[in-house]
Image (spheres, rainbow, N blue to C red):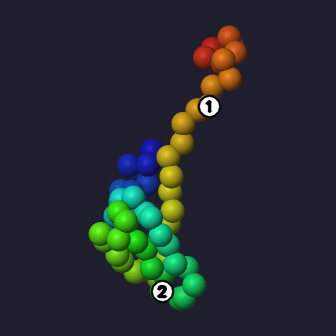
């Protein structure tokens, strides 16, 4: 699904980048993002933050079935 979202955004000339964000400065109208512990820096008018997720299993018998 995320690939579909990215393709949709790219249709409107969105510049999609990925990496480990280590610092973000939202204090000004232009936002500053630091990637990979200062190895890469960029600025942007708007930023979309997306993170991954994984299930936290409780160990119940019905978890997998449901």
Which residue is pictured at 43% across the width and 54% down the height? 5
Which residue is pictured at 29% across the width and 69% down the height? 39
State whether residue 51 is above or below residue 41: above
Q: CA distance from mark 2 to mark 1?
A: 37 Å
State whether residue 15 is above or below residue 45: above
Q: Residues within 10 Å of mark 2 (few under 14, many from 20)?
A: few
Front position in the image: 5 or 43: 43
Disc 1 element: loop
Q: Residues within 10 Å of mark 1 (few under 14, many from 20)?
A: few
For the N terminus, give its image quadrant.
top left
Relative horizontal placement of residue 66, taking residue 9 as reference (left or right): right
Q: Earlier in the sequence, mark 2 or mark 1?
A: 2
Front position in the image: 63 or 1: 63
State whether residue 1 is above or below residue 7: above
Q: Furthest-bottom residue in view?
A: 29
Disc 2 element: loop
User: Which dot marks residue 35?
Assistant: none
Q: Furthest-left residue in view?
A: 39
Q: Position of residue 40 (x, y in %)?
A: 31, 71
Please name the residue that numbered disc 2 is placed on.
Answer: 30
Please name the residue that numbered disc 1 is placed on.
Answer: 56
Which residue is pictured at 37% across the width and 65% down the height? 37
Q: Position of residue 42 (x, y in %)?
A: 36, 77
For the C terminus, give its image quadrant.
top right
Q: Position of residue 59 (x, y in %)?
A: 66, 17
Q: Position of residue 46 (x, y in %)?
A: 49, 77
Q: Furthest-front residue in view?
A: 37
Residue 3 shows in the view: yes
């Amino acid at each position: 699904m995320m690939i579909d979202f990215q393709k949709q955004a790219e249709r409107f000339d969105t510049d999609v980048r990925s990496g480990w964000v280590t610092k973000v400065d939202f204090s000004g109208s232009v936002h500053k993002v630091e990637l990979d512990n200062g190895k890469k820096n960029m600025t942007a008018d708007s930023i979309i933050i997306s993170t991954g997720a994984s299930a936290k299993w409780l160990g119940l018998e019905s978890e997998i079935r449901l």
